[in-house]
């Protein structure tokens, strides 16, 4: 039995799980701490958007749990069931982070522009790279099979590239959020570290996802070279 492969796959399975548990535990901990000013997430989002001149950016609700996002297609910050109407330090940190993304789009922040540009291609690659790989393996005795295997590797590499571009955009959105929460006195001095911990925990999920994807890409390249 090759224990190195077993360890390799265990890392790929466990790392995202640990990151996911950590962000949920951290959010839950600070979701019990109400902000001193008793501001709701909607109030905070509106204040941050308006202070950046984004008066036309709307606030919506998407119904998920910790699925908050900014949708540039509708120019709307969508709050989840976990944050909408909440006054916790954790919820405000997450909501402010999404406002950071709205500001990035308004400023044409390069990583966010690049990410938006490659989304259509990445969506196709993420859905079909594995199918292309399987077909390539089935036809591996033929030249077209080898070509398909390498095509799947390129498709998955595009997914990894998207994650690489996403990471600095997420980090920058959190940086903007913390700066705004402090400069506009939305959170008190003792509340800021709590919000920062929530955003750092969320960032770790992106880091974990990227690490696992890079490991998967290395594995695919290794398998392809053996064909």
Image (tube, rainbow, N blue to C red):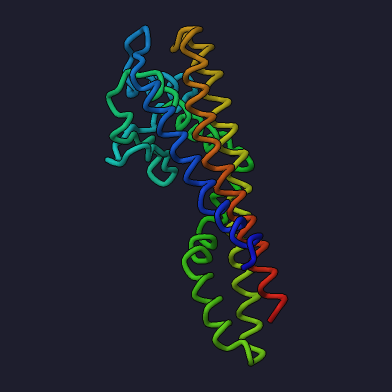
In this image, 74 relative to 172: left or right? left
Q: Which x, y percent locates residue 220? A: 64, 68
Question: Furthest-bottom residue in view?
Answer: 142
Residue drawn at 44 percent across, 43 percent down: 72
Question: Furthest-right residue in view?
Answer: 225
Q: Which x, y percent locates residue 221? A: 68, 68
Q: Quadrant of residue 138?
A: bottom right
Q: Quadrant of residue 29?
A: top left
Q: Which x, y percent locates residue 37? A: 35, 7
State how many labels appear.
Answer: 0
* Residue toward you, 59 or 182: 182
* Residue toward you, 162 or 119: 162
Quarter occupied by the C terminus? bottom right
Residue 100 lies, with reference to residue 187, above or below; the image says below
In this image, 178 relative to 31: left or right? right
Quarter occupied by the N terminus? bottom right
Residue 103 lies, with reference to residue 29, above or below; the image says below
Residue 217 lies, with reference to residue 88, above or below; the image says below
Residue drawn at 35 percent across, 19 percent down: 88
* Residue toward you, 25 or 59: 25
Q: Quadrant of residue 43?
A: top left
Residue drawn at 44 percent across, 24 percent down: 93
Residue 176 lies, with reference to residue 9, above or below; the image says above
Q: Which x, y percent locates residue 196? A: 52, 22
């Amino acid at each position: 039995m090759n224990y190195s492969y077993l360890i390799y796959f265990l890392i790929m399975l466990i790392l995202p799980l640990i990151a996911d548990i950590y962000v949920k535990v951290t959010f839950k901990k600070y979701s019990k701490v109400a902000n001193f000013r008793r501001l709701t997430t909607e109030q905070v989002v509106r204040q941050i958007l308006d202070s950046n001149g984004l008066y036309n950016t709307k606030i919506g609700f998407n119904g998920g749990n910790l699925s908050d996002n900014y949708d540039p297609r509708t120019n709307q910050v969508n709050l989840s069931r976990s944050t909408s109407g909440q006054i916790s330090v954790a919820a405000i940190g997450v909501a402010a982070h999404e406002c950071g993304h709205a500001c990035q789009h308004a400023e044409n922040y390069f990583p966010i522009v690049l990410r938006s540009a490659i989304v259509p291609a990445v969506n196709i690659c993420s859905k079909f790279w594995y199918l292309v790989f399987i077909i390539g393996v089935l036809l591996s005795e033929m030249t077209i099979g080898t070509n398909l295997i390498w095509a799947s590797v390129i498709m998955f590499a595009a997914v990894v590239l998207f994650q690489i571009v996403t990471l600095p955009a997420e980090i920058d959105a959190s940086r903007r959020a913390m700066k705004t929460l402090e400069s506009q006195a939305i959170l008190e001095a003792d509340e800021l570290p709590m919000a920062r911990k929530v955003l750092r925990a969320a960032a770790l999920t992106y880091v974990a996802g990227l690490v696992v994807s890079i490991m998967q890409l290395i594995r695919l390249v290794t398998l392809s070279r053996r064909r």
